[in-house]
Amino acid sequence: MGDVRYPGAPIRLTRRGRIVVVALLTLITLGALWVGARIDAASAGGRGGHEGLPWVVVHGGDTLWGIADAVTGEADPAPTVRRIMELNGLSDSVIRSGVRLYLPGDSVR
């Protein structure tokens, strides 16, 4: 008689079959990552362009409040801090050295 399969019996794959399954899963994962990166890039583009906006490079010891205070002069820097966070997609006021921060165009004196 031939090979009889029982319900619930495990499927056995040859070495080539396992390689094909791993390759397909890898391609599906890479495709999902690529689509996710494209969606993220498209949503980042929706924040508005930074063309023509002034910018500063953050140095060690700089704070968002200090940068906003320097560019607003005598005015209250709190609204400028919020606008800098919005322009640069920051979720909090933590900034890292070496990062370029775009500033609101009307706040620079």
Image (cartoon, grey):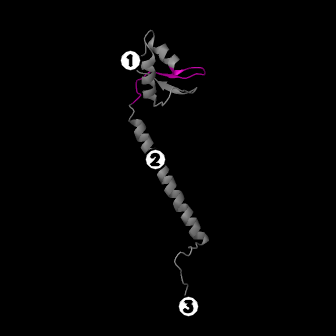
- Distance between mark 2 and mark 3 Cα atoms: 51 Å
| Left or right of residue 8, residue 82 in this image | left
Indicate the quadrant containing the C terminus: top left, top right, bottom left or bottom right: top left
Judging from the image, what secondary structure is the residue with disc 2 in? helix
Label 3, residues with CA under 10 Å away: few <14, some 14-19, many ≥20: few
Q: What residue is rendered at 44% in x and 49% in y?
A: 35
Query: Considering only order in the chain, which callout, 3 or 2, is on the residue closer to the N terminus?
Result: 3
At label 1, which amino acid type do we have? Answer: Asp
Amino acid under disc 3 = Met
- In primary-sequence order, the first of circles 1 and 2 is 2
Please state which of the two labelled residues, at mark 1 or mark 3, is closer to the viewer.
Answer: 3
Judge whether 14 appears above or below 40 on screen.
Answer: below
Q: Which residues are magenta?
A: 49-64
Secondary structure, mark 1, is loop
* Residue identified by numbered label 1: 106
In this view, the residue farthest toward the top is: 74
Counting from the top left corner in percent of width and height, residue 26 is at 54, 57
Query: For this rendering, which residue is in front, 77 or 58?
Result: 77
Query: Dominant secondary structure of the magenta stretch?
Result: loop
The residue where tag 2 is placed is 36
Return the residue found at the far front.
8
In magenta stretch: residue 54 = yes
Q: Give coordinates of residue 59: x percent, y percent.
A: 58, 22
Residue at 51%, 53% (x, y): give it: 30
Q: In the image, what residue occupies the spot 48% across and 53% down?
A: 31
Residue 4 figure quarter = bottom right
Return the residue at label 3. 1
Circle 2 Cα neighbour tier, 10 Å, few/some/many (<14 / 14–19 / ≥20): few
Q: Residues within 10 Å of mark 1 (few under 14, many from 20)?
A: few
The image shows residue 2, relative to residue 10, as above or below, that is below
